[in-house]
């Protein structure tokens, strides 16, 4: 077998083995140090900004003081000159150039372990920020007037002033000032309620075939059973409907079907909670008809996760065998009706791929995996194993799969492309000693595939199906292993992961590129389930149709139909796609890529109608203005590039660029009139830009407090301040999206959850509806054009969840976006507001 196939097998094997803890910890520490450096740079940038601001105010202060009291000017000069901050020492903008270094990526869940490094950053930042504000306190007689002047310039240090008031929130010790809109007379009286809208899981796009086995079965009900993320999907093949089992708390890894073809066992990984503490893995046994959980097996017993499960057959499925993902791959046998463990034993330190009971004898169990096939015997409450002996045959690196033939033989498929037939033979007393029992030995070797044999499936009449890795072939064999028919699945779907028999002729085929195919040898195969195969970040919904687009690290751009639950088309780019947005006319979509390049695709033809590049860093956000005349491109080089758009979105001309952020751009939104932009960055800045006036930074952020926004996807802002939990890390929320009705806001967090808040949501500790289903950080959320559905993307779980938005009767009314409801319409809950008042002094 060549290197490429070995590589694929190694990846598959590694999925059920332990992760390299030391390497992971080093990566966590490195990323945390990068974050600390970024925040320190940001604090220094803030200090330098304030120094320049003070320098600009000195002449004005002198003029006003001289007019009232000429002697006061000398006090001002002495105050600043003593500390070396006289006017000739003014800091130019070039002093910030060295700070504009992008951070590679936003941190993920694993970085929560680095609390010691984060705490140091929290301690250092306020000290650095305070160094500039101390300049004013050295001259107490000027403090009040100077604070008023700073308030008028929109400084982050401003507090209640003559023009209104502001609220501060803190992220990792960094103060972020939010200006309260004019129509809020009493912030303390605002009350945050749960939204009347709720979400129901409507559809699950994707299938986990990339790194899991035994993950696709056919039920007598006509439903295919498979899993992705934390959801087990029951997909009715003929009716094209889905039901979902959703009781798992982390990614599902394995399935087993009871002999009655109704009950199902599903095992999951351990996962971690939001504080980084491990959660216990378990196996659920549930009814596929009612979706009712019957038993939870092994809570507190398994380590890291559950890799394989199997029901016994000879005794009507009374026992369940489980192999966990610990170093020793513990094998345990359970009387699942009583939820009692019968026996437990160490299996092997190598990866285990599959486990099954002998269909004729519950006391015999077989496991296979890396460099082994074991034959287990249960006797007097003890499990003993015998290694399969390869003898004159070459020992393969992996035993990928096995089945029991109708004659009782064991057939294994291996990484050498062979099907081996195992049978019992008398023990070799000379070698094994007196009293040795019979052993399993290879009776026959059949050459089957080029590359690995990934799966075997026995049909009702005794025929055998085999699925290949490298050659992507499906071969039908007679009972005596004579080849009868074969076909090859298209390359774009990857290798054959597993095969499920539908009716002896029709088959379901799961592939390593996360697709499920339906077909036969005579008619060929078509995809009925498809998904991405790597981390996803880009998500955009069409402005007036129920379609949406996704893109990710697998370089695929996919257009989905939310009504039909189908993939409209999929095209492959040269680079990873990270962000996307539809033009308001709905004819084209722009996609931002990893290297600073971005392309515009025609929705009908899929052709690239425009191909440009801005900088050499990854792009994080694409956003068209409401009328489609401009496109804003946010980059990790700290800049926002503005393009004028003509010819219906097919022609783009550089209009200008917004310069002023001290870290990478994360989110941005246009005002309703298309003249202004609000943007967030990696160091938690909120900046506003006058695009129509020449892409100018609006220094007085106070003036933007009443501006109306066409969309709201910025994670930092007064209207969404309440979505942040107390003590949040700045990367805990990856994305949010306000509904078009402007009643609710959906939030994608780092802890696998989707939240639904009321909008606006300007107070801390706001309540939310919380929804589970993703098994990885949720990277993006978007409402469809009519708010009928919400789409959410999982990062590493490669899963797209489509949620139906349920509205109450009163929830149909719309209200304006930019202005909060009158205080009288909100109940009183003043404690969080009072606490903020104390923090503001």
Image (cartoon, rainbow, N blue to C red):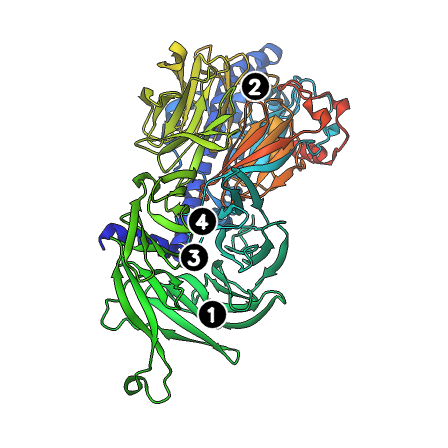
**Extreme-bottom residue of the structure:** 434
Check disc 2 and report its element: helix, strand or loop: loop
Mark 2 burial class by Cα count in 10 Å: few <14, some 14-19, many 20+ = many
Q: CA distance from mark 1 to mark 4?
A: 24 Å
- In percent of width and height, residue 576 lies at 35, 34
Q: Are marks 2 and 1 in contact (CB under 8 Å)?
A: no
Q: Residue at x 56, y 50 (%)?
A: 249
Residue 554 screen position, x and y as percent: 36, 38
Q: CA distance from mark 2 to mark 4?
A: 56 Å
Which numbered mark, 2 or 1, is in the foreground of this view?
1
Of labels 2 and 1, earlier in sequence is 1
The foreground one among 733 and 514 is: 514
Indicate the position of residue 746 as horizontal and vertical percent values.
Answer: 58, 32
Tag 4, which secondary structure?
loop
Q: Position of residue 335 (x, y in %)?
A: 58, 68
Image quadrant where one finds the N terminus: bottom left
Question: Image quadrant for the C terminus?
Answer: top right
Determine the residue positioned at 43% across, 14% down.
630
Q: Is residue 48 found left or right of 197 in the rendered image?
A: left
Q: Which residue is mark 1?
A: 360
Residue at mark 4: 503
Q: Quick one: label 3, few (<14), some, or many (20+) residues within 10 Å?
A: few
Dot 1 or dot 4, earlier in sequence = 1
Location of mark 2 (residue): 709
Depth check, mark 3 against mark 1: the one in front is 3
Label 4 Cα crowd, 10 Å radius (few <14 / some 14-19 / many 20+)? few
């Amino acid at each position: 077998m060549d290197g490429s196939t070995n590589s694929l097998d190694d990846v598959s094997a590694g999925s059920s083995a332990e992760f390299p803890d030391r390497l992971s910890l080093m990566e966590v520490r490195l990323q945390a140090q990068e974050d600390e450096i970024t925040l320190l740079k940001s604090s220094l940038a803030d200090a330098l900004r304030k120094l320049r601001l003070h320098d600009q105010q000195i002449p004005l202060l002198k003029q006003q003081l001289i007019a009232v009291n000429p002697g006061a000017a000398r006090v001002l000069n002495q105050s600043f000159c003593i500390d070396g901050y006289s006017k000739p020492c003014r800091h130019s903008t070039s002093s910030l150039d060295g700070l504009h270094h992008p951070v590679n990526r936003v941190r993920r869940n694993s970085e929560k372990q680095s609390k010691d490094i984060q705490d140091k950053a929290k301690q250092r930042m306020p000290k650095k920020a305070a160094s500039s504000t101390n300049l004013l306190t050295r001259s107490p007689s000027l403090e009040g007037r100077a604070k008023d002047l700073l308030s008028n310039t929109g400084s982050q240090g401003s507090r209640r002033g003559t023009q209104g008031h502001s609220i501060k929130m803190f992220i990792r010790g960094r103060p972020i000032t939010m200006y309260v809109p004019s129509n809020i007379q009493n912030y303390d009286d605002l009350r945050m309620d749960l939204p009347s809208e709720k979400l129901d899981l409507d559809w699950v796009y994707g299938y986990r075939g990339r790194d899991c086995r035994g993950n696709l079965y056919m039920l007598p009900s006509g439903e295919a059973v498979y899993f992705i993320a934390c959801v087990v999907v029951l997909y009715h093949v003929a009716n094209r409907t889905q039901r979902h089992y959703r009781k798992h708390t982390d990614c599902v890894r394995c399935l087993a079907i009871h002999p009655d073809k109704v009950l199902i066992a599903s095992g999951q990984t351990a996962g971690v909670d939001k504080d980084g503490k491990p959660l216990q893995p378990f196996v659920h046994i549930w009814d596929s008809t009612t979706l009712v959980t019957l038993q939870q097996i092994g809570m507190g017993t398994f380590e890291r996760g559950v890799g394989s499960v199997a029901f016994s057959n000879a005794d009507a499925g009374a026992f369940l065998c489980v192999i966990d993902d610990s170093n020793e791959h513990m094998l345990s046998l359970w009387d699942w009706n009583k939820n009692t463990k019968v026996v437990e034993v160490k299996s092997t330190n190598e990866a285990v791929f599959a486990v099954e009971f002998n269909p004729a004898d519950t006391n015999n169990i077989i496991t296979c995996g890396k460099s082994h096939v074991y034959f287990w015997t249960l006797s007097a409450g003890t499990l003993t194993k015998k290694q399969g002996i390869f003898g004159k045959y070459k020992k393969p690196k992996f035993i990928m799969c096995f089945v029991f033939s109708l004659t009782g033989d064991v057939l294994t498929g291996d990484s050498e492309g062979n099907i081996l037939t195992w049978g019992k033979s008398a023990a070799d007393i000379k070698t094994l000693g007196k009293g040795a029992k019979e052993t399993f030995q290879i009776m026959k070797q059949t050459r089957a595939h080029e590359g690995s044999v990934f799966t075997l499936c026995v049909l009702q009449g005794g025929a055998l199906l085999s699925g290949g890795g490298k050659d992507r072939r499906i071969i039908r064999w007679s009972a005596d292993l004579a080849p009868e028919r074969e076909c090859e699945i298209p390359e774009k779907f990857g290798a054959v992961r597993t095969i499920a028999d539908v009716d002896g002729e029709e088959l379901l085929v799961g592939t390593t590129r996360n697709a499920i195919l339906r077909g036969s040898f005579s008619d060929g195969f078509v995809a009925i389930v498809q998904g991405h195969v790597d981390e996803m970040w880009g998500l955009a919904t069409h402005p007036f149709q129920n379609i949406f687009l996704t893109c990710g690290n697998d370089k695929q751009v996919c257009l989905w139909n939310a009504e039909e639950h189908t993939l409209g088309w999929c095209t492959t780019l040269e680079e990873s796609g990270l962000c996307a947005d539809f033009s308001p006319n709905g004819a084209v979509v722009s996609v931002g890529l990893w290297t600073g390049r971005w392309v515009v695709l025609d929705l009908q033809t899929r052709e690239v109608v425009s191909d440009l590049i801005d900088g050499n860093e990854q792009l994080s956000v694409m956003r068209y203005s409401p009328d489609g005349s401009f496109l804003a491109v946010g980059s990790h080089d700290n800049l926002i590039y503005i393009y004028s758009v003509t010819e219906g979105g097919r022609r783009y001309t550089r209009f200008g660029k917004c310069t002023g952020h001290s870290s990478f751009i994360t989110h941005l939104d246009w005002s309703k009139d298309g003249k202004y932009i609000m943007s967030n960055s990696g160091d938690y800045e909120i900046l506003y830009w006058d695009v129509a006036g020449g892409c100018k930074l609006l220094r007085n952020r106070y003036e933007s407090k009443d501006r109306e926004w066409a969309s709201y996807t910025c994670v930092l802002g007064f209207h969404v301040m309440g979505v942040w939990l107390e003590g949040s890390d700045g990367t805990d929320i990856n994305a949010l999206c306000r509904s078009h009705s402007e009643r609710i806001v959906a939030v994608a967090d780092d802890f696998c959850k989707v939240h639904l808040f009321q909008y606006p949501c300007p107070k801390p500790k706001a309540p939310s509806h919380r929804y589970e289903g993703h098994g990885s950080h949720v990277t993006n959320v978007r409402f469809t054009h009519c708010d009928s559905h919400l789409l959410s993307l999982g990062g590493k779980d490669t899963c797209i969840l489509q949620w139906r938005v349920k509205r109450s009767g009163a929830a149909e009314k719309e209200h304006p976006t930019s202005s909060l409801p009158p205080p009288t319409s909100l109940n009183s809950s003043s404690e969080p507001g009072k606490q903020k008042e104390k923090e503001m002094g």
